[in-house]
Image (cartoon, rainbow, N blue to C red):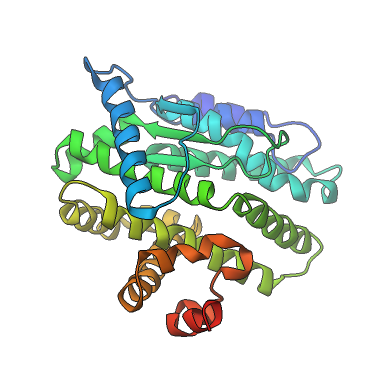
Amino acid sequence: MNLYRSARAVAGASGSDAIDWGSAAEAAKAATDPGSLALEPGEREAYARDVRDARAAVRTVSGVEFDVPETVEIQNRHHWIDANVSTFERVMGALEPHTDDFPGVARTINTGTMTVLLSFLGRNVLGQYDPLLLAEAPDEDHALYFVRPNIVNAAETLEVEYDRFRRWIAFHEVTHAAEFGAAPWLSDHLENRMEQGIANLSDGRLDRDTFRELDAAMTVVEGYAELLMDHAFDEEYEDLRRKLDARRKGRGPIQRLFRRLLGLGLKRRQYERGKDFFERVVTARDLEAASVVWQGPEYLPTHEELDAPDLWLQRIDP
């Protein structure tokens, strides 16, 4: 970790865009210890086995045919930053036509802000299913990432077995692959909402309806993944979830502030709200009824229906 090199990279931000993405990536990596990728004997195969087992278990409980991405990577923190800086650039790119001749001072500040964001996430993300939203190549493969140093560190901090914790993370990320496999339309749906919301925002208009639709869709994505986890994971997991929640709540004020600024509190709310929705649907009907959400965007619950699953059940099966 070299904070001087990080600050120098930010100070050297250039170009005409709002953020110098190359400088942001360089600075974030300079400020972040990459962590070790010295795998134990058999560990790489263990990751592969966890993914295969998760795919088989999720297929069985969901009845959904899907495959995992061809790109499955065991990464260090620098690898994760490199893989995700292009994602942030694609999402933020919708604002670029409105930022010609961006002032140098503002660009430096924006690049510094993105550096802090990438560095913080790079030190905390455990695993990631990346649907590569807004990718230029429509047939570009989705990707599955495991940030080994973070998984090792979290397992040690939580005082849980590394093998079991790693397997739990693999199952969670594979459930997301199942969702996008069950709903080929989902990527386009999320992309359209993101592009529309950002375009309106860049024009000075806050499109609340679009962002509410996006939030509802992401609540379904996170909640359904939690539902599948409960049914598919083949080991005890309640202690893992309990300890992770306690770790999030027990972090210091600076970390809690970062999580709030990055919207990670919103993601936790999406987990909880979505999981409650699907648990109530399964109680009223069954898992097959819950899977109806992937038949098309019109089957997604509205914000109101997320809090009243009976209304959603009446609408989709009057």
* Residue displayed at 40% across by 52% down: 63
* Residue displayed at 72% across by 70% down: 206
Image side of residue 204 versus residue 304, left or right: right
* Residue displayed at 60% across by 54% down: 186
Relative image position of residue 38 (x, y in whole percent): 29, 16
> Considering only vertical position in the picture, is 151 above or below 210?
above
Between residues 191 and 124, which one lies in front from this camera angle? Answer: 191
Relative image position of residue 223 (x, y in whole percent): 41, 62
Q: Quadrant of residue 102?
A: top right
Residue 251 visible? The answer is: no
Image side of residue 193 versus residue 40, left or right: right
Between residues 202 and 197, which one lies in front from this camera angle? Answer: 197
Image side of residue 203 versus residue 159, left or right: right
Between residues 19 and 125, which one lies in front from this camera angle? Answer: 125
* Residue displayed at 38% across by 32% down: 147
Residue 215 visible? The answer is: yes
Relative image position of residue 200 (x, y in whole percent): 77, 64
Q: Quadrant of residue 174?
A: top left
Between residues 17 and 83, which one lies in front from this camera angle? Answer: 83
> Considering only vertical position in the picture, is 192 above or below 149?
below
All told, the count of numbered labels is 0
